[in-house]
Amino acid sequence: MKEKADFNDEELVPSRECRERFLKQHSATLWLTGLSGSGKSTVACGVEKKLMVAGHLCYVLDGDDVRRGLNRDLGFSPRDRSENIRRVAEVARLLNEAGLIAIVAFISPYRKDREEARKIIGPDRFIEVFLDASIEICEKRDPKGLYQKARAGLVAEFTGVSAPYEVPEAPMVHLKTGEESAELSATRVYEYLNQKFFLKTPGKFFYRRKEQ
């Protein structure tokens, strides 16, 4: 006679894998990093649009938006930058647990902070995307006039001018946004997800015991 489990259905909650199967996708975090003006927000929105059109649930976490709300108490010192990244990494992890594809568009200038984000999110779900545009090109774009203000000393600790940017050593996706269009960059990111099977329906359902 088959033994009954020592817990009932009410004690079970859907796992991340269960939610992923329901959404017909594997959760992941696209971590877009690059200088201000390199195209992070534009590419992030482009990727989001392509995913949504294809029927995939995702959400963009944009640096400016997060700093106006969740991280409005943080400045731009190295310590505050690290905390800024830690918090958004935790949010991205929760979105992944819900089965979503998170698209993070943050300058995130320090390698150690990006590595910490990778650990929080999980190396199997963290996809580092480097938006490679020279400081000269970013300054020419300068949609917010921030480089001009930084050069005039009106903005302190500005990445690329008075604060460093540490280029990713081995990004999983390398976008030459100083040379290619935002549309092409977004397409390349979408194709990467597709090639790595993140946009495929996972296997079977999994449940986990509800934490007491």
Image (cartoon, rainbow, N blue to C red):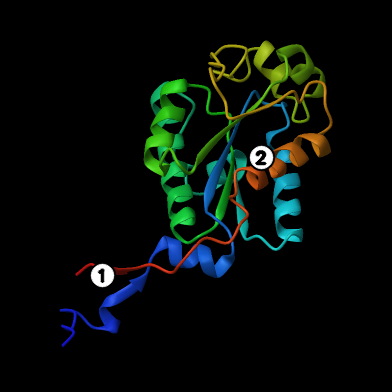
Residue tagged 2: 192
- Compared to residue 138, the image places residue 201 above or below, namely below
With 143 as the anchor, is 79 left or right in this view? left
Q: Which residue is mark 1?
A: 209
Up-down: is 135 above or below 181? above
- Asked which quadrant contains residue 17, the reply is bottom left
- Asked whether 156 or 18 is in front, the reply is 18
Amino acid on which disc 1 is placed: Arg
Question: Tag 2: residue type?
Answer: Tyr
Q: Is residue 2 visible?
A: yes
Q: Is residue 83 visible?
A: no
Q: Position of residue 46 (x, y in %)?
A: 76, 45
Provide residue 89's location: percent of width, then percent of height: 45, 42
Query: Could you tell me which residue is drawn at 71 percent across and 46 percent down?
Result: 47
Element at badge 2?
helix
The residue sitting at 81% across, 35% down in the picture is 184
Quarter of the image for the C terminus: give it. bottom left
Seen at 15% across and 79% down, the residue is 6
Residue occupying the far front of the picture: 1
Q: Residue furthest bottom?
A: 1
Foreground pick, 170 / 196:
196
First along the sequence among labels 2 and 1: 2
Q: Residues within 10 Å of mark 1 (few under 14, many from 20)?
A: some
